[in-house]
Amino acid sequence: ETGVTQSPTHLIKTRGQQVTLRCSSQSGHNTVSWYQQALGQGPQFIFQYYREEENGRGNFPPRFSGLQFPNYSSELNVNALELDDSALYLCASSSKQGGKIEQYFGPGTRLTVT
Amino acid sequence: DQQVKQNSPSLSVQEGRISILNCDYTNSMFDYFLWYKKYPAEGPTFLISISSIKDKNEDGRFTVFLNKSAKHLSLHIVPSQPGDSAVYFCAASLIYGSGNTGKLIFGQGTTLQVKP
């Protein structure tokens, strides 16, 4: 186990609704990244938070937003849900120590938009 | 623009033999490369990483080789075990901003089947 936890495990929402996904990072990791993984694809980078500030963003619209808290846990918020938002949402916490980079993923939240 | 490519969708090997998973990339600015294993309905599991200034990193049965001139890396698993059967993703890291780790750009994945 990586120590990265996500909640909820599964979620079903209706088009147009809003959703909040949560992530607790591994102890000692101050960087949290969010990814979207569609079926049969590799994970796609949404954005990253470092010390409570957004530290880069992928090709996702502004209705995807996030937060990082002082304990380094994080939230992903998606407004005005669309059918194409149905995917596995992965949170990853990371560190770089001794010249080695490690990024650990949580189990993911499966979001279904109907 | 697919910056990280895994051109083999699947690979099948016999238990005890070597599994070689390949990955190509286009961006010479990538500074780290990572390999992940993924089972259905689970998050990716980190296996091994390599800095762009190295050409080899070994951890137990897993070895990653990096050929910067060819923009190619490979993951070797020796000996392969049935429990290694999973989808393997290659990812490249691009550091930017003030964070200590960059965003990961993933390949499409290769499904490895290890037959008993």
Image: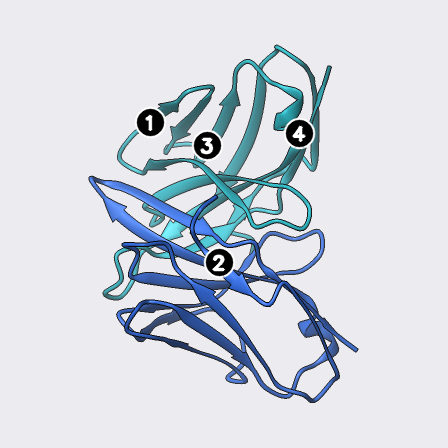
Chain colours: A blue, B cyan
Between the residue at mark 2 and the residue at mark 3, the CA separation in whole angstroms equals 30 Å
Closer-to-camera residue (A61/B38): B38
Circle nearer the N terminus (1, 3)? 1
Question: Which chain letter matches label 2?
Answer: A
Which quadrant would the C terminus of chain B be assigned to in this image? top right
- Give residue B55's mark: 1
Say what secondary structure mark 4 lies in. loop
Q: CA distance from mark 3 to mark 4?
A: 20 Å
Marks 2 and 4 sit apart, C-alpha to C-alpha, by 24 Å
Residue at 52 percent across and 15 percent down: it is B78
Q: Which residue is mark 3?
A: B73
Crowdedness near tag 3: few (<14), some (14–19) or many (≥20) residues, C-alpha within 10 Å: many
* Chain ID, mark 4: B
Q: What's the residue at 66%, 83% (across, down)?
A: A81
Label 1 residue SS: loop
User: The N terminus of chain B appears in which quarter of the rendering?
Assistant: bottom right
Residue of label 2: A5
Examine the rendered structure and indicate whether residue B69 appears above or below residue A86: above
